[in-house]
Amino acid sequence: MNSLPPAIFLMGPTAAGKTDLALELVRHLPCDIISVDSAMIYRGMDIGTAKPSAAQLAAAPHRLIDILDPAQAYSAAQFRQDALREMGQVTQAGRIPLLVGGTLLYFRALQYGLSDLPAADETVRAQLEDELQRNGLAGLHARLAQVDPRAAARIHPHDTQRIQRALEVYDVGGVSLSDLVDAPQSSASEARLFPYRAVKIAVVPEDRVGLHHRIESRFKAMLAQGLVAEVERLRSRGDLHAGLPALRAVGYRQVWGYLHGEMGYDEMVERGIFATRQFAKRQLTWLRSTQGTLKFDISENISDKILKHLVTALI
């Protein structure tokens, strides 16, 4: 495994400062950044995804940003294919892939693959749609909590697509999504699936209150920068709707509801902050259980600590 080329995973919850850290690492290491973010892939969704600025992208280009229209869906399997292609190009150029983001399922799919997940089953999907109409989304999430409590804890109760997919996996194969995803790989099979030596780093803030303040400040800053106008531009296209994966992203979902008269401005702000905090909580739960990952708390000299670790780990 040590003969494999290295790839750096920089993971962390929302609002943990991953982009700034990545830019600092690129200044000191021969790395090219590959985004691991299920919302930054969409064009026209810049403010609410905290997409790097034009100046930042000019200084350190990010791959797998702005690759899709918001009307399009994207899967972990598609990400894996795209990421491996980009990583191959980076490695061939004699540089190190630096994968940065908070979509932790993508990281998992990239390293371990998704080949063991059952294919989509149209009959089961139709049954789940019927179940959704009969029992509502809360009923589906409650059933998921019974058959796959780990998935239910990770998946937001309003995330229809992921709840249905997790139930579909269970209904088709009789094995939970969590058990399939967490199944151990042998070193040989892992090398075939992921031909890199992963150096995994996670920013895991220990000060939960501090992270909550950062989340609140960032969401309010996004609103000041024009998040409502950004969502209004998407809404005015006429071909997008709230059920699309792009518009279920945290922040966008709440602003979309506000623009449709489902809530007032103050309630939208409150819901947006709360949803982002819940999202960060789920990310932290996942990160704390991730094996083989060196975890760093947020501190003034976090970049120095990470660089010191990487200099040794990349040898």
Image: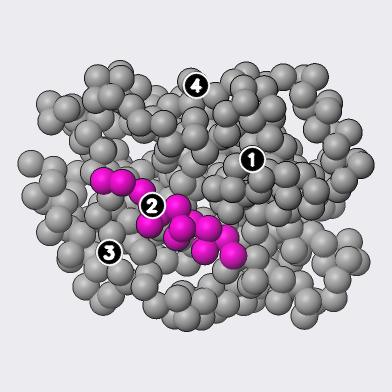
Q: Position of residue 197 (x, y in %)?
A: 22, 34
Picture layout, residue 67 above or below residue 46: above
Q: Nearer the viewer, residue 142 or 119?
A: 142
> Is residue 104 visible in the rendered structure shown here?
yes
Q: Is residue 14 magenta?
A: no
Q: Measure how far apart labels 2 and 3 are at the Cα level.
A: 14 Å
Residue at horizontal 52%, vertical 64%?
Answer: 281
Horizontal placement of 254 versus 15: left or right?
Answer: right
Determine whether, in the image, residue 314 is placed left or right of residue 39: left
Residue wearing tag 3 = 296
Q: Residue at x 84, y 52 (%)?
A: 236
Instruction: Characterize the local packing of mark 1: few (<14), some (14-19) or many (20 or more) Cα atoms within 10 angstroms.
Output: some
Image quadrant in which you'd find residue 118 = top right
Do the residues under discs 3 and 4 have CB atoms within 8 angstroms?
A: no
Residue 147 picture location, percent across and down? 64, 40
The residue under label 4 is 116
Mark 3–mark 4 Cα distance, whole angstroms, equals 32 Å
SS for dot 3: strand
In the image, what residue type sits under mark 2?
Ser
Mark 2 highlights which residue? 289
Mark 1 highlights which residue?
147
> Which label's residue is closer to the chain start, 2 or 3?
2
